[in-house]
Amino acid sequence: MTTSNRRSKAAIRTLVLLCTALAAGAAGAQTQPPPPTQPADPARVLVTLNRAIQLYLDDHLTEAAAAFQELLQLDPGNITASYYLGLINLREGLGYAERVTPGLDPQQTAELRANARKHFEAARRSFEDVIQKANERALTPVGAALLLGIAQLASEDPAQQDVALELALRAKQTLEDYLATDFGAQDRFAHFYLGVAQYRLADEYYNRKDFVRANDYVRRAKGSFRNALSRAADEVKRGTLSSERFAQFETVVIYYEGLIFVQERNYSGAMQKLQVVVEKERGRLQQNAKDILESLKEQEAIAPSRITFDSPVGPLEFDAELAISNAYDTNVILLGKDTLLPRGFKRNEDYRFGLDFGFTLSRYISGAEVPAVGQSLTIGVGGLVSNAWQPNIQQFDVNTYLGRAYVNWQPIQDFYAGLQYEYSYTKLGQDPFISSNSITPVISKVWRREPADAGARQRGALGDEAGRTDIYYTYDYRDYFDRLADRRLNRDGKYHALGIRHTANIMKAKDLWPSYFASRDQERTLLGNRWSSVYAGYVYRNERTRGTEFDLWGHSLIAGLEIPLPLRFGFEFDAEFTWEEYTARSVFDYRRNERSDFVQRYDFGFTHTLVARGEVPTMRTLEVKLRAGIALTFQDSNIWDRLGQDIYEYDRQIYGLELLVGF
């Protein structure tokens, strides 16, 4: 019910910021600008840039334009200068457009509109020049670490952050004013750069904990990018833009849409977008997309994301699992040792075909979205349909229908408090058998190792999970529908359980089998982060029914391990030892003894991953496994009936094969 494996955005965000600084706006033109005959003096470039930016901030547009032109003379490939010249031309054009008023002389009106259009076209050329120049030099850390003239907004210097934010806000406002004009509304570059500015502002407001503004800018950025593509498609229809240039422009828009998905934690959607960029683009933009894609894949392998889609209450996460199984059961009806078959049964062992389907739909609310929740809050619902059919003992066909609702709260990092309600209805054969209403509160603590990298420790990055501890209580009220010959056999009642379980992660698969994964890059990314782990726990049970035969208190010790193996295999082992002491004399024991049972359960499983999560680009949440298992149960009891039959003592073995499909 609890989900401690929520992804940390810090590492991915850092990589995204760096990669965006390298490639933002690189829409496919890979030609490099001609280098100056003499390399530009970095100090002079920096001084000129800072002077130009200050003039722009002070609204001295003519002097600022001259300073940026001077900067282009020093450094012809300077993207920042081209971008700001575009902004200045936009503002100059808007100034001419605003002077057109009703009643103005027609000749003056025509001149003002011509001047406005001249500046708008000059701005458009500057914006297109930015895209054509985009190359490795975009990362030059000058001034406030500007990117396309829009602040990088990643400086740790508060003064620089304030200047950077002001620049981005002013750029956004200028672009919005331009887009309000008839000419600007059709300009794909203006829509695109407005989207870039909004994306940058969203990231900055996330960092400043202003989540309302951050989410608003994310929505705006999506709309701006859609508008940019729409205007580009219109140009193709008019014949003013070639299909090749449209494809180049579309690729960079897709790149930014992927970055927005990263901000929204829709990692599956982000990977689909970035994969398109990797396939279509070449050069720096492709490399940036690859870097972010690999980081996302590693995060997915550690803590897989779910299918995400928008809704009126925010993004909903969906996951489901389908299980198809076939098994051989040696003791379907749990027949006791030396016990005669009941009337109507010809055999006790049988094959079984199983079909299960379950799903979960949840809303994850991060502290970034709603600070009052602390680290996070997850609210969800789910369901399960489980069916098992016996061809020869149809009286023991089992059909279960289950629904649940839960809430999982993380008030502080790695500490969880959850609550789940569950209702189930089960039929045995064709008849109703039992209904159950249960509620389970749980408290969980995730334990972590310190990051091995000193720099990561200084940044406060989270280390790998060392393990987790869960403490839970379950109250289950059950209602049985079977007909009773004796009221003492009534099992309706209250079933209580209190448990604790601790899981320890030992070693990752890539470290456990280094020679195998060394030459298999894809498997190392997809499967190398699987943990070998062990767990142990204790459960106390107290069950009180309307009858007397089944009232008990019991103690269970549980333990298990999981080991990832080469060649996509894995091994699982679970064990449970239960002591049950019943509180009343048994109806069936000829000595009138109180029942006392000792139960041993063992489960061995080998799994083979046919399709790893993230392996299918078009459906990254798909995971397909094949599991072969043996389940053994040995129940010892002290009850004998008058015929000398051990009616509660039995052995059972189940040999099964399951196909597990998760998505």
Image (cartoon, grey):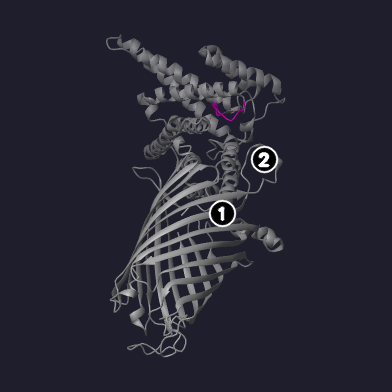
Spatial CA span between label 1 and label 2: 24 Å
**Image quadrant occupied by the C terminus:** bottom left
- The disc placed on residue 457 is 2
Residue 216 shown left or right of residue 256 in the figure: left
Residue 358: x, y in percent? Answer: 40, 62
Mark in front: 1 vs 2: 1
**Front residue (pair 148, 270):** 270
N-term mark: 1 or 2: 2
- The disc placed on residue 53 is none
Q: Is residue 175 above or below residue 249?
A: above
Residue 629 sits inside the magenta stretch: no
Q: Which of the 4 quarters of the picture holds residue 230?
A: top left
Say which residue appears at 58% left-offset and 19% top-offset. 68
Residue 148 sits inside the magenta stretch: yes
Near mark 1 (Cα within 10 A), the count class, few <14, some 14-19 or many ≥20, is some
Near mark 2 (Cα within 10 A), the count class, few <14, some 14-19 or many ≥20, is few
In this rendering, the count of numbered labels is 2
Reading the image, the residue beneath label 1 is 469
**Front residue (pair 406, 44):** 406
Residue 225: x, y in percent? Answer: 43, 37
Q: Is residue 585 above or below residue 207?
A: below
Region of the chain picked out in magenta, as a range: 147-156
Q: Is residue 87 above or below residue 411?
A: above
Amino acid carrying mark 2 in the image = Arg
